[in-house]
Image: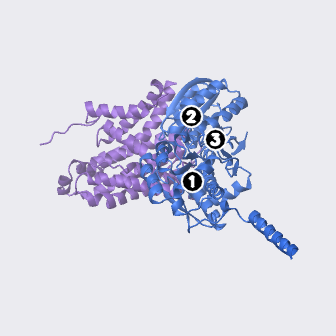
Amino acid sequence: MKKRLFVAFMIVAFFSTLSLVLAPSSQAGKLSGDKVKIGAIYSTSGVCAEWGMAAKIAGDIAVEEINAAGGIGGVPIEITWYDVGCKAPPAIPVIQKLAKQDKVLVVNGPCQSSVCEVIFPKLNRLKLVLVSFCSSKPGLSALSPWAFRNTLTSDKQLAPAIEKWKKEYNIKTAVILYNSEDAVSTVEGKKIMPVLFKKYGIKLLKMFSFQTQTLDFAPFMTEIKALNPDGIAVGSCYEHGAKIAIEALRQGIKAPILGGACNSTPGLIEIGGDAVEGYYGSTAAWIEGNPDPRMVKFLEKFKARSPGGKAPPYGGPRSYDNIYIIKKVMEEEGVTNKPEDLEKDRDKIRQGWKKLKDYDGISGITTMDKNGDGVGGVKTLMVEGGRFVPK
Amino acid sequence: MIFQQLINGLMLGANYSLVAIGYTLIFGVLGLLHFAHGEVLMAGAFMGFYIILWTDLPLYITLPLTMIATGALGIIIDLLAIRPLRKDFHLAPLLSTIGVTIILQNLAVKLFGGYGTRFPDAIKDYHFKIGSLFISSINILTLGISIFLMIALYFFISKTKIGKAMRAVSESHLTAGLLGVNVDWIVLLTFGIASALAGASGVMIGLAFHAISPFIGLTFALKGLVVMLLGGLGNVLGAMIGGLILGMAEVLAIVVLPTEINLQDIFSFGIMILILIFRPTGLFGTRITQG
């Protein structure tokens, strides 16, 4: 009898232990509620609309994929999104509404550094995590422990690019042209590039600044031609970079061009054509030409939805990755999604983002540094034969 | 190098002139600052873009087709957004044109994306070198077309019967009406012609500056305004010369002033302020004493 009892006890104990081992952990258990509310700031109007539209399309693709696979902890994601028109003032009431009225768990976005700069300090009071998908001005995430940027700041992107550019073309002298109206481009042109030039032994001949609405680069290139530099560094986004390259080609300037953080994006080749051959830059996401099947699949879905079937700038893949990282963080940190746990859940998401390490997304490997900025995954690219080639 | 910069200034100025003429025409006839004029230019750039892309038609057909399309757009804007408000508070039509600007720009973003788009190479771009000077065939063409359109418009206004009617309406709607001029029709025609010129500008700008986006209208709308003030409100010849002066001035700002701070716009808007202070009639305008 005792033996039977002992065997029965052992069987019960074995299966109990087994069930504990095999059962999904409480962290990955079913979330409560009928939807997981995630906020988003996508500027689909205004001068940065292409970045917001790309981020929205990419974010929507990720949400649809996740929901089709059962959502987060069995609960589908619902996105509440706002368009702030690339401007900081409307972003302030929007972030307050997302935090207090919409009661979202976390926010994907915004893109622009100038918007992040204004709303990041407000997060300390709201205690809500914001994860930008493309802001790259150095130092912004340090403004709040609730602010994260799943992207690479310009300094991290430009250092390897300038080093390789100098080596590739034997650059000894260079000029800098930058967009003085854009926060990131100004930092690139005025602060990062001159410092890196010094570090790598490139003599800076002259700096030129232009504005976002500048269309005609002919006068700038005439001035640059007279200086005869070995290279031209551009602190701006790809559209200006492409126009500068076209004008350089037109005026017979042979100096190779290096672009800032948002230059190595498909639009550069689309606008620049032959003129951007040899154009150097680095990016937070290698898009066109990337053989990673996940990126190929994403790009196919993205182009089917984007106006004109265009590929996104790097903010698109980063926005896509953001949604997947949010899912991962929520499941790993044991977010409950109960209304009474909102504050705790938001803090758990913050902790999850803080310790994010080696996340393998379509944009590359991402790890958060101590400030809440992404590190790793920087790709230096050169345009060769009408496509981006890693260097 | 300075001669090359003067050529650059001339090319840029020709584009400004073409935009400013449209502004000036509408201001002259209606006394209205048509803020949506820049967006009509943007619409023209995209219309030209799609005509070339879809039909592969040559530039000499694309350009008139675009001008007809933007002319029609201008007429629609007048009929829907300006005419119904013309007799209301005098600022109402002006505010309405700001509304049209916002609608057209956002519509373009939704339709074409906020992306910059490469304008198709409607003609082969040959590069000519004369000593150290360099001129591209596209620049010569855009300059030629701009000058041709400006001269054609000048003769149309000064020599034709309709042109005389337009001038009469610009003097006084009431008197012109009493003399048998169909004022509404002339206003509509003015919108059509000004918008057709804006459409031509859009195509020229696409060709000359390689890329277009839903946001190019604003730049040219503001510059067109400066040129109009520079040349004298409502003065077509003044707008032509004013555009060239502004283009030259902007280029010289890059040559002469420190380049680390962008002073081009400060320079152009500074000129506008100085003119408003010291010569409010513009360089070619005349003071009219009323009462």
Disc number placed over residue A369 in the picture, else none:
3
Dot 1 lies on which element? Answer: helix
Q: Residues within 10 Å of mark 2 (few under 14, many from 20)?
A: many
Whichever of labels 3 and 2 marks the residue nearer the N terminus, that label is 2
Whichever of labels 3 and 1 marks the residue nearer the N terminus, that label is 1
Of residues B69 and A1, the one nearer the viewer is: A1
Q: Are marks 3 and 1 on the same chain?
A: yes
**Which colour is chain B painted?**
purple
Of residues A294 and B44, the one nearer the viewer is: A294
Residue A18: x and y, percent?
Answer: 78, 66
Q: Is residue A36 above or below residue A236?
A: below
Disc number placed over residue A188 in the picture, else none:
2
Q: Say which chain tag 3 marks.
A: A
Mark 3 belongs to which amino acid?
Answer: Asp
Q: CA distance from mark 3 to mark 2?
A: 20 Å
Q: Quadrant of the N terminus of chain A?
A: bottom right
- Residue on which the image places disc 1: A55
Q: Residue at x 74, y 51 (%)?
A: A291
Q: CA distance from mark 1 to mark 2?
A: 23 Å
- Horizontally, is B78 left or right of A182 in the view? left
Residue A156 placement: quadrant: top right
Determine the residue located farthest toward the right in the rendered image. Answer: A3
Q: CA distance from mark 3 to mark 1?
A: 23 Å
- Horizontally, is B291 left or right of A302 in the view? left
Mark 1 belongs to which amino acid?
Answer: Ala
Residue A39: x and y, percent?
Answer: 52, 57
**Which colour is chain A painted?**
blue
- Horizontally, is B251 left or right of B163 in the view? right
